[in-house]
Each structure stands twice: as structure tokens, then as C-alpha cells.
Image (spheres, rainbow, N blue to C red):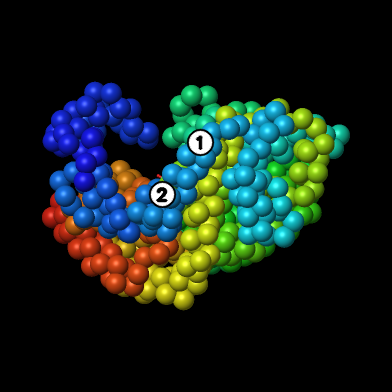
Amino acid sequence: MSVTSNNLPTAELQALDAAHHMHPFTTNDELKERGARVITQAKGVYIQDSEGNQILDAMAGLWCVNIGYGRQELIDAATRQMQELPFYNTFFNTTHTPAIALAAELAKLAPEGLNHVFFAGSGSEANDTNLRMVRTYWAEKGQPQKSNVIGRKNGYHGSTVGAGSLGGMSYMHAQGGMPIPGIHHINQPDWWAEGGDQKPDAFGLARAQELEAKILELGAENVAAFIAEPVQGAGGVIVPPATYWPEIQRICDKYNVLIIADEVICGFGRTGNWFGSTTMGIKPHIMTIAKGLSSGYAPIGGSIVCDEIAGVINAIEFNHGYTYSGHPVCAAVALANLRVMQDENVLEHVNNVAAPAFKEALEKLAEHPLVGGLNLCGMMASLPLTPHKEARAKFAMDEGTAGFMCRERCFANNLVMRHVGDRMIISPPLVITPEEIAVFHTRAKLALDDTYKALKDGDMLKVTS
Ligand code: PXG
């Protein structure tokens, strides 16, 4: 194994990293003190660090390595495409086979009526495309004032200015002038944290009806679209109550508000169907895709657009696009990934094998005294940590402290399980086997036990008043 960058000792790599590499969503000075973990290689569901630890990756990279690491089919597709045509653009009346084939394949996989693809390099870029596209659509229909877009607090749609504005992360909005004008946010359907004494179904309905109130406040003639993840991912795997999406759909239909379903995490099998919209019964006008589209092997995203919107946008010159829109190598890798998904019946594996074993493991973990519940949809889940299980109580100490302590103990037990605040997040490769899920369970249980003991010993199990 000779990867140049792996030849240096870990400490030297960490020092170079600290000196020159600015990490995303990181306090780099703190990281410098700690030293970044250097990941050197990966196979299947395991990643390996520069110290030789074999770590079970229960986050599939960053919610994306759905078919697992080290797949030769994708490596071959990239190699072949690099030899044949490493780059050409899709501007100026040109196209190429990988972009054509991928767009056609996506139209086949997408729900009925979604037959057109605008490519981007990432989920963020795709959501910026969506924002401009829905506004342009209504302007072309003679309603330029129908330009406001409604998203949700704690929703995540990316980090560019447009996508970050559509998202509802207050700590992101606090930096750099977001949200841009014309974007509004309603509350999220997070029953566990915000439902209080309400029953989940009543709470789901109430949260959906906030959309109607916001549309009426702005005037339906001024609202272009509603954007949401079918199941919130980065916000903490928030599975909405069953009443939520049908009510959202009714409201959007009633007021002629377009639905943008952000499928960047939910898409490509994560919820047990090709798209989370199918799982949740949503009829979107545009779906945002990225991540699992290529299983993370190459950076590619896009928007799958309905016939009606594409009909309007295709009639004009839409002054928008990226150098790497439909990048041939990324498109070839994505196609190979979709082929593997189909040839190996990954969705059947999820529904018949992986998801049932995953559910069983998580239900056992949810019995732990530190775990206050279980949010689960297909192969994405979160376990909220709590100092008081029955009351769904929050910790008196700073939010995220317990979650961070647990994440560090997961790492110490060779498991990647991320935290969002005090929720532990799990989103493993879809191809994970029941045996590997058993390893996940053992390591997660150890980490929870260690965390619980540390919290107890430190008198940190106090409930917020
Ligand atoms: N939409 C959704 C629903 C996402 O989850 C994006 C858009 C943006 O995609 P790009 O490819 O531009 O990153 C995402 C990305 C986390 C985390 O810590 C999640 C994402 C990105 C980075 C970190 O959970 N999701």
C-alpha cells in the first residue's frame, strides 16, 4: 500500500493539516490542539486511520457511501471515463454520453412526471439552482412577485449563500449575511424535542399548519415554493409524525405553492425507497439530489425537475450553470453506482435484511437509561440522549456536551456515530450486513455505557429546569 500522504508519521500529518488546511464547520484552533484523525483507507463499512484502527463507519462517510467503500465497478467507471473524456462542458450546444445516460436513468428512477435533470457539483449548488429556477418559473408565468420561499428552522440544504438561507440553521445565519431576502422559516416537526404534551399526530398537524399561516401572512400570490427534507438529516434525523406530510401536500396544492423535496440524504435508498418522497407520500415538483447519487465516490448533485417547470424553463435561456454540471467522470461514476444498486438489489437488501436488523439493534439501544427515544426511518436514525428518560428532558449543562462525550467514546470504541446536539446520529452504508450491525450494536452500547458512567461520576445528569 503506497499512498504518498500516508508515509508521514501521524503527528507530522496533523501538524501540516493544522498549518494549512481550514476544515469545514470546525474551530480549527481547537482541532490543532487535538490533532485531526487521519483516515487513510476504507473497505466495505470500515474505515482505517493512520494508526491502523479499523473503525465501523455508521455514518457512511457523510450520509453518502451507500454501497460501501472500495467498489471496483466505480473505480473502473472513473478510470475508463478519464481515459475516454475526462472533461467536457455541457454549455454552448454540447453534451456527452455520461450526462445523457445519467439524466435518462434518473428520469426512469424518479417518480412519475419528474423527467428532467439539471446537474450541479453538490447538494448546495443544486439548491441554489432550485431557488433561481422556481423564481424564474413564476416570473415566466407572469407572476414575478411569487418569489418567496419557505423553509424550516433546523432544516439543512447546504452551505452556499442560497442553500444556507433556505436552511434554517441559526448558527449559520449568524455568520455572513444570511438568510438573503425573500426566504422564511417555519418550525420543524420535531415531536421528541418540541412536542410537549401533545400527541405526535396532533403536533404534526399543528406544525404543518404553520405553513398555511405563513402562506396567508405573505399572501399566496407571493409564495413560490416550500422546501424541506422528507426526513431531516443534519438537523438530527427528525422523522415527522404521520400527519405532517399529507397536510403539507394539501396546503401546497391549495395555494399553488411548489414543493422542493431535498433528497440529498433521503434519496437513493436511505429510507427504503429510491426517494424519501415516495416513503413520505410527497408529490414534489423538484427533487434535490447529491451524496448517494454517486455513493460519495465523485462529487455530483442535481435537480430532478417536473415536466411543467422544465417546459417553462426550457423555453428560455436560463442563465445558470456550473463548469462541472454533468461532469463526465462524476456522471459515469454515478451511473456505475446506480447500476450496482440495481444489479445487487440494494433496496431489497435494505427492506428485507438491513433495515429490520438495524431496527432491532436500535430498539435495544433505545432501552439504555441514557437514551430518551428512537427516531428511525429505513437506514437513518437518531438516539436522543437524556438525563430523564420518561420526561424526554434536556440536560441542564450546555446542549451538545453529552452528545460530544458520547461521540468521543464511540471513536474510542472504533465506531463513527456522530452527534447533533445531544442526539446520536446513525446512517450506515445501505449494504451493511446483520453481522456488521451486531458489531455496531456492541460498540454503540459500550460507548453509551462509558458516557453514562462519565456523566454520573461527573454529576452531569441534571435536568434543565
Ligand atoms: N441538502 C441536504 C438535505 C443535505 O444533507 C446538502 C443539501 C448540501 O449538500 P453538499 O453536497 O453541498 O454538502 C446536504 C448536506 C452533517 C452534514 O454534519 C450534512 C451535510 C453536509 C455536511 C455535513 O450532517 N448534508
Q: Report how far apart the C-alphas of labels 1 and 2 lie in the structure.
A: 14 Å
The amino acid on which the numbered mark 2 sits, given as a three-letter code, is Ile
Q: Secondary structure at mark 2?
A: helix
In the image, 316: left or right of 45?
right
262, 40: nearer the viewer: 40
Q: Residue at x 24, y 39 (%)?
A: 3
69, 408: nearer the viewer: 69
On whether ligand 1 comes within 8 Å of the CB at mark 1, the answer is no
Q: Of the two numbered discs 1 and 2 on the same chain, state the one appearing first in sequence.
A: 2
Q: Position of residue 94 (x, y in %)?
A: 68, 33
Which circle marks residue 75 in the picture? 2
Q: Residue at x 55, y 40 (%)?
A: 328
In the image, 169: left or right of 276?
left
Question: In the rendered view, would you say 376 is above or below 20?
Answer: below
Residue 123 visible in the displayed image? no
Q: Residue at x 70, y 47 (%)?
A: 116
Which circle marks residue 86 in the picture? 1
Q: Residues within 10 Å of mark 2 (few under 14, many from 20)?
A: some
Q: Position of residue 111 (x, y in %)?
A: 68, 60
Q: Residues within 10 Å of mark 1 (few under 14, many from 20)?
A: some
Total marks in image: 2
Q: Position of residue 96 (x, y in %)?
A: 63, 40
The amino acid on which the numbered mark 1 sits, given as a three-letter code, is Pro
